[in-house]
Image (cartoon, rainbow, N blue to C red):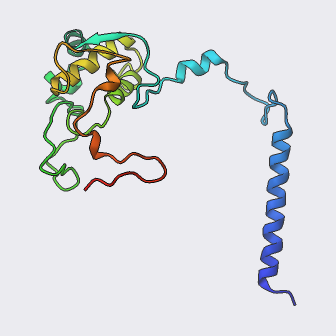
Amino acid sequence: MRSQGHSRHRYFSFVLAIAAACSISVMAQPQSAKPLGIGRVATAQEIAKIDIDVRPDGKGLPEGKGTAAEGAKIYAAKCQSCHGANGIGGSADRLVDRESGKNWDFATNPKLVKTVGNYWPYATTLYDYTNRAMPFMQPGTLTPDETYALTAYILALNKIVPEDAVMDRATLPKVVMPSRDRFVIDNRNGGKIVK
């Protein structure tokens, strides 16, 4: 009589053989083959339209520029109805506040509200999110200049940059957010622990 371990070994060997055969079959198909017979390979232009992510180091930021003064006008027209005057008091998330508690107490103090000014670690994230998701009813309709201007305005409201600062692909990644050091870098080796 064979042991249960031997039977399991044969079963897993069989499963691995089938998986290997399937992967070899898929890899052997030419690039133009469509497994389900539908669709087509995306063009470089189609990929470029949706490749809009912006990294903390600024990679992905487009050409353009904007100031807080320009951003104030755009904010009044496209953002204030949801986020309130000066980023406070609207029906949508609050954007302005620097209060983060004695020890960055967001986990234990429900009165603290996470905002761009007290919680977000990178200024480039503000550009990225605004560009892809705002205005709420018309996401993706802002030009790069409008997005830079709104970013400058919100950063200035939070007193992170001066009101006359110009935000562009060179200056925005250099902005040091108040909470940057509160986040652990994910380098897959662990980062420094914040206590």
Pinpoint residue 78: horizontal percent, then vertical percent: 27, 15
User: Which quarter of the picture shows residue 136?
Assistant: top left
Residue 130, compared with residue 103, is above or below; it is above
Q: Nearer the viewer, residue 60 or 25?
A: 60
Residue 126, compared with residue 179, is above or below; it is above
User: What residue is shown at x 22% (from left), y 15% (from top)?
Assistant: 165
Q: Quadrant of the N terminus?
A: bottom right
Pinpoint residue 27: horizontal percent, then vertical percent: 81, 40
Q: Farthest residue in the bottom direction?
A: 1
Is 71 displayed left or right of 14 in the figure? left
Pinpoint residue 34: horizontal percent, then vertical percent: 79, 32
Q: Quadrant of the C terminus?
A: bottom left
Is 12 displayed left or right of 94 in the figure? right
Is 46 displayed left or right of 123 in the figure? right
User: What residue is shown at x 13% (from left), y 40% (from top)?
Assistant: 99
User: Which quarter of the picture shows residue 72?
Assistant: top left
User: What residue is shown at x 85% (from left), y 52% (from top)?
Assistant: 21
Q: Nearer the viewer, residue 178 or 112?
A: 178
Residue 143, compared with residue 1, is above or below; it is above
User: What residue is shown at x 78% (from left), y 83% (from top)?
Assistant: 4
For residue 45, say whether it is visible: yes
Pinpoint residue 97: horizontal percent, then vertical percent: 15, 34
For residue 136, say whether it is visible: no
Is 66 displayed left or right of 58 in the figure? left
